[in-house]
Amino acid sequence: MDKLSGSFVSLISKQGITAVAIAVVLCIIIALFNKKKGRKMSTKTVVAIGVGAALYAALSAISIPVGPNTSFRIAIALLPIFGAFFGPAAGFLIGFIGHALNDAFMYGNIWWSWVFLSAMMGLFGGFVCFDRKFDPLNGICTKVHIGLMYLWSLIGMFVGSVIAYLGDVYLYGEPSEKLFVQITAANLSNLVVIAVIGIPAVILIAKSKARNQGLKKDF
Amino acid sequence: MSKSGSLYIERDSLFHGLDGSIKLLMLIAWTGFVFAFMDARVFLGMILIGLGILKLSKLPAKAIWPLFVFIFVFTLFNSVFLLLITPEYGSKLTGSYTDLISLGVYSITLETVFYCFTLSLKYIAIMPITILFLFTTHPSNFASSLNRVGVPYRIAYAVSIALRYIPDVKTEVENIINAQEARGVAFRKGDAGLGTRLKNYATVMVPLLLSSFNRIEVVSNAMDLRGFGKNKSRTWYQRKKYTGLDMSFAALSFAVLAAGIVIKLTIGAVYWYPF
């Protein structure tokens, strides 16, 4: 526990900030690169972002409390799901818009640092789409893909946590030990939600879609 | 929240007349300025100015009050949590230790309590301007003002789709939960254990996703048919030309934001402790 907390504290140093800045820039470059490949954002992606963000806001009302300041938030499961179906850019924006709108309408106050935690989980959840073969809407979702989904979700949570931590320490001025406890609790509950609802939902939908077997491309 | 999924309240005031993008700019500048401090005096001043602005905007107190009650409760919980985990944080910053409650190793210092107070004021200080933006900007003005401050129009449009569909999707979620409950799936506390209840939400998620994908398909086809996304930029029905008042508020916002950044970079957010 102490070692982990130390690794968080070391991020406040100049080197730590530079490393995080490089990571963020890399993420943005990857996201832009991905966007360029599909040229511009398609209408379908735009609508998917809108409906996804609406779903996030609607589902945010549902949460199962498990302890003080911690609850299973069902809405979190949407991020890897929409990321997997519509790509990293959609995942990022759904997390960002959904979280910001929900905060604004429910509380009249937006916690910007935590908005980025959601956004990062969506962004990294979408990185499974880098494998062009992955296509859950046509029934293609192998065991490797499932493993990748878990891996990317974990990385997304880590990067998001770092941003939330830095944002809360620098912008809001919260003490780091308290944040460490909060972020650990939030990540554990988010991980449970993703593992129980998020990724199984993708697998279920992929299974329900028929895979084409008899069709071949005629050259 | 009204049926259209927005908090907009129609009034005739100075701030209702301002362009949405200017209010968004004010929101960014105000938030940036608050982030630059850790000083209770500044926050108190800003809260007073913010309340004055809300008074000028003629919004009914009944609509705003619940949000303030919520933030009070939130900051209270936050402070208790902070005191529990880091009872001497404030003292570390000031260097002076004034014990308030002492239980052997664990002691809460006065400095930390004052720190909690300052932090709570900080959260409250961000509030008035967010409320102003949400309550005085018409939802159809929302997307165009985002676009005007530089957000690509496709993303701005996605925000307006989200606003449009929040109530619809909410009804859908309720319907699916009711249907599953009628089949005997447990969602309430006491009906089943924590793990089972969580798992049961997966039975809501899959139908919800399938119907949402359907909705996405229908809406995006309709938009494609109307030529959405064909051009590099788009015009907005609600957009008006900036007036002199708009420009002066924009200039003020830029000045405040610049001041905030300069203070943050030179002095930093120094914790102000009076005793």
Image (cartoon, coloured by chain):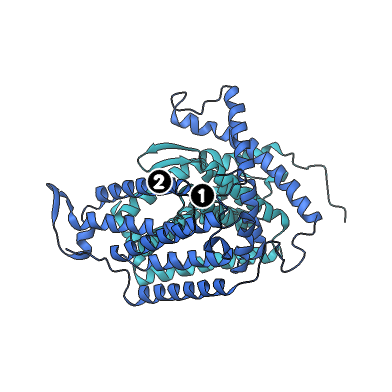
Chain colours: A cyan, B blue
**Res B155 label:** none
Name which residue type carries label 1.
Answer: Phe
- Relative to A72, is A174 on the left or the right? left
B263 relative to A192 in the view: left or right: left
Quarter assignment of residue B166: top right
Q: Residues within 10 Å of mark 1 (few under 14, many from 20)?
A: many
Q: Quadrant of the C terminus of chain B?
A: bottom left
Instruction: Tell me the chain of label 1.
Output: A
State which quadrant residue B93 falls in: bottom left
Work out whether disc 2 and disc 1 sit on a shared chain: no
Q: Quickly name the residue at label 2.
A: B70
Q: Quadrant of residue A139?
A: top right
> Badge 2: few (under 14), some or many (20 or more) residues near its Cα, within 10 Å?
some
Chain of the residue that carries numbered disc 2 in the rendered image: B
Q: Which residue is mark 1?
A: A105
Between B173 and A156, the one nearer to me in the picture? B173
User: What's under tag 2, amino acid-wise?
Assistant: Phe
Q: Residue B201: percent from the left, percent from the top?
A: 54, 34
Residue A45 in picture, x, y percent from top left: 68, 55
| Residue B164 horizontal/vertical position (percent) | 64, 49
Between A166 and A202, the residue placed more toward the observer is A166
Whether tag 2 and tag 1 are in contact, CB under 8 A, the answer is no
The reply, left or right, for residue B218 in relation to residue A94 is right
Distance in Å between CA atoms under marks 2 and 1:
12 Å
Could you say where residue B130 lies in the image, as x and y percent from the top left?
48, 58
Q: Is residue A87 visible?
A: no
Query: Which residue ends up furthest to the right in the rendered image?
Result: A219
Q: What SS does tag 2 mark?
A: helix
Quadrant that contains the N terminus of chain B: top right
Which residue is at the front of the view, B268 or B123?
B123
**Figure label count:** 2
